Image: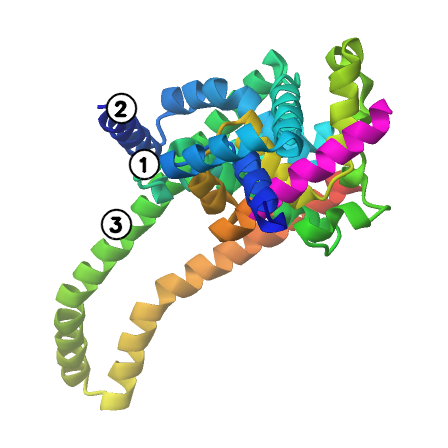
Amino acid sequence: MKMNAMDTEAGAIARGLRRRDPDLLDRLIEQYQHRLLRYLVYLSGNRELAEDLFQETWIRVMERGHQYDGQREFSTWLYAVARNLTIDYLRKKSPVSLDGLMEDEDHAPLEPADTRPTAWELVAQHEQAEHINAALAGIPAEYREAIVLRFQDGLALDEIASVTGAPMGTVKSRLYRGLNLLMGKMGRMQA
Amino acid sequence: MTHNEHERARELIALGSLEDTQQTWLGGHLRECVACREYADAAGQMVRAVRSLPVTADARLVRATQMRVRFHAARLREARARMWLVGTACLGVGLSATITVPLAWRLFAWMGQSAGVSRFVWEAGFAFFWIAPALVVSALLMARGTHLADQGRSIGD
């Protein structure tokens, strides 16, 4: 029953995107605003860049909406679009892979996401959140991505594999190693 | 218990969602292994903390995005309408040419014979008759393009 509801909703979205229905796009932008921005912030490591990529992602969704077939969750397809855009942008700016982001010290998006004070006003109110953000920023981007998709956005493992284009085994390994690294960093911060 | 069992248990904990058999095995392991139980608690706390991170989009960003998307959608619609118009025009020209070319060819042949000119002359006349409109339009477009480029430069200066 739930599957049917999902199919119906995904199908309706697919049909609307083929028509480039502006009201549907408005609704989707509102519905996914926080999840998508959060994903982009942690993927790019930079709030300002994430906001630009947020807009570009929705323009890409509008342009290529006909490619969404409604067979899978819309969010999975949306994240894949956002991910490809981010990687394209970062490659154009500096030819590095997502896997190598954290090693490039001159690369602005590699900085922890607390470079823009207004974006972190809420974080500053919670010391633990500050620590977690710093810890997240300190782990390799592909681990951070897996953790954000799994634990913040609640994507299933096969959906993460679909978004990232990585095999299921790699996704599991990234989650395990990422979580270990995160706990290690948090442990050191709190010690 | 082997090292591999602890490793397997921790990997399962990190995945977050398990099949029934995995859940049963993990539950049994955690009942016996204090270290993995502590790991599970720490991982649970970590996951809850990650889930609670506040990153939200503001209304300004949402509105700006909606406006940009609508603007681009309108531009795409206009471009599509233009392409449709060009396509229809090409089709019309093609159809019209298919009908008129043989007729015009016969007309030029008849006029050539009536005027007593050589075949080469009336064929050249026929070719010019068909090419002339395209030449005129090309010349006009080039002139307009040059004019616009000059205007752009003078504005730039």
Judging by the rendered image, the residue that carries numbered circle 2 is A2
Q: CA distance from mark 3 to mark 2?
A: 46 Å
Could you tell me which chain the residue with mark 3 belongs to? B
The location of residue A97, given as percent across then percent down, is 68, 54
Q: Secondary structure at mark 2?
A: helix
Q: Secondary structure at mark 1?
A: helix
Amino acid type, residue under disc 3 in the picture: Thr
Judging by the rendered image, the residue that carries numbered circle 1 is A18
Amino acid type, residue under disc 2 in the picture: Lys
Q: Residues within 10 Å of mark 1 (few under 14, many from 20)?
A: some
Q: Residues within 10 Å of mark 3 (few under 14, many from 20)?
A: few
Most extreme residue toward the top, as rendered? A125
Could you tell me which chain the residue with mark 1 belongs to? A
What range of the chain is rendered magenta? A173-191
Residue at 74%, 47% in the rendered image? A101
Label of residue B88 in the image: 3
Q: Secondary structure at mark 3?
A: helix
